[in-house]
Image (cartoon, rainbow, N blue to C red):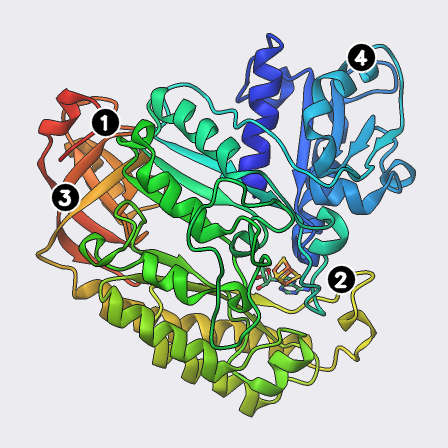
Amino acid sequence: MNVADTERMEALMLERGGALTEQIEEADVIVINGCSVREKAVHKAVSYLGEHKGLKTRYEGPVIALGGCVGQLDQGEIFKRAPYVDFVFGPDAIDQLPELVDRAKRGERHFVQAEFDKTLSYSTQTKVKKNKALAFVNIMKGCDKYCTYCIVPFTRGREKSRTIQEVLDDVAALVSQGVREVTLLGQNVNSFGKGNPNTAGYEPAELSNPIGKVGPRPGEENFVQLLYAMNRDPRLKQLKRIRFTSSHPLDFSDQLIGAYADPKEGGVDNLAKHLHLPVQSGSNAILQKMGRHHKVETYVEQMKVLKSISPDIGLSTDIIVGFPGETEEDFEATLKLLTEIEYDNIYAFSYSPRPGTRAEKLVDDVSKKVKSERLARVMKHQLDIAEGRYAERIGRTMEVLVVGLARNDGMLANSKLGRVWTGHTTCNRVVNFIDQSGRNLEGSFLNIKITNASGLSLQGDLIHDAGFAEGISVA
Ligand code: 5AD
Ligand code: SF4
């Protein structure tokens, strides 16, 4: 979400005639877009600010702004600690960024723009830099779930969705600019559509799941309708992959599982074979304290059905370790769940209390030491699982969307042979490969034969690059 927000900020500033610089000393505007979901992320944003305070004297230097969820939460408190910050803004003020910068340039200081947008509807237009094959498309914002540990409902506000028609037109414009993969974004995309009447009669009219409680009401638009509408829209013919993130198991519907089926069986053919569905814990007692309103067993059952429909699907999840009251037994239940589901990838975090949340009032009784031990154990456990899964891919040829040059890969040692590129498969596995031609491969779909695997990424050889000459589509 924050990456997408940052891209939007960049695009808005570029539209105003700005240019990006890699040299922070050269910048005359510095915007820190901070995440507040965990304490550590807030510390990162604030310490980054501290590292760069020397760039500004009292009378000169760049405009410095603090934005995103950190800005929303901070509401200007930062001015006391860091008076060199000119203004603070929240996620709903992103589109006003150029005007806010102008106000600061005119000498206004220490102002806060962190009002929630109070309208019930949500309308926007995606902005991307030119020549990009991959775009993030916000389809809804906010979250109404109020998991007990989570600050997002307080920093991003209530759920609001764009209309299906608006998203279709937006994605059509992106596809005409060369975009071939979209990630539909929201805090809880599977509840997309709430409050928007389904006047066009999109199907399926209603969503259900074994837990019973699913997303929008009958008569309203819903996420599965959006996927099928994207699949049908002739303007999106060249769109190769649709992804989405993030979601809550309560809104994960039977109909969405059906969308992963083979197109001949009624599935959505450009839906990427990947699902990120946060589970947070493998213990029912902890899930209950987290206010997640579902059981481990129902989640496992949903994943089983999904795998039976789409056997090659790549699954990922979020895990929190050290939630208040988490016993060794609870933690081991999480390890067991990872073994059972066999995720490709997990994002694991140590619990940190967030201001204003219900869990903040619980005693944070798992010591720092135990939290970090559990974090290391869960990551090691997952790495072992992923190593096995990734190794199964050796020898296969996979279609990879190239996203850029690789940064930290062992293959870099061989880079005298050429440049190391990185990309991902439809299942969202990272694939690195060497290209000796010197061309810019960013945005190409290429066939790569997998030669090596670790628990985090695959390595392979470029075996077929006819598609590059043709642009960004390989059949
Ligand atoms: N402490 C640790 N992790 C958290 N997350 C959200 N809130 C907290 C918190 N207070 C994690 C969840 C969520 C992901 C985006 O961040 O796993 O899915
Ligand atoms: Fe936070 Fe996700 Fe729960 Fe919403 S569903 S409150 S964003 S963890």
Judged from the image, the secondary structure of the residue bearing numbered disc 1 is loop
Q: Do the residues under discs 4 and 3 have CB atoms within 8 angstroms?
A: no
Vertical relation: 204 (above or below) 28: below
Earlier residue among tags 4 and 3: 4
Residue 105: which numbered mark, if any?
4
Mark 3: is the Cβ under 8 angstroms from ligand 1? no
N-term mark: 1 or 2: 2
Q: Which labelled disc corresponds to residue 354?
A: 2
Identified by mark 2, the residue type is: Arg
Q: Position of residue 389 (x, y in %)?
A: 24, 68
Which of the marked residues, 4 or 2, is nearer the chain's N terminus?
4
Residue 401 visible from this viewpoint: yes
Label 2 C-beta lies within 8 Å of the nearest ligand 1 atom? yes
Query: Ligand 2 sits in which quadrant?
Result: bottom right
Q: Position of residue 405 (x, y in %)?
A: 32, 34
Reply above or below: 88 against 357. Answer: above
Disc 4 residue type? Lys
Q: Which residue is mark 3?
A: 448
Name the residue at 79% across, 70% down: 358
Residue that numbered label 1 is attached to: 472
Cα separation between marks 4 and 2: 34 Å
Q: CA distance from mark 1 to mark 2?
A: 43 Å
Give the residue at the far bottom of this rendering: 329
Q: First in sequence: mark 3 or mark 1?
A: 3
For label 2, the crowd category at 10 Å Cα-Cα, with few meaning under 14, some 14 to 19 and many 20 or more, is some
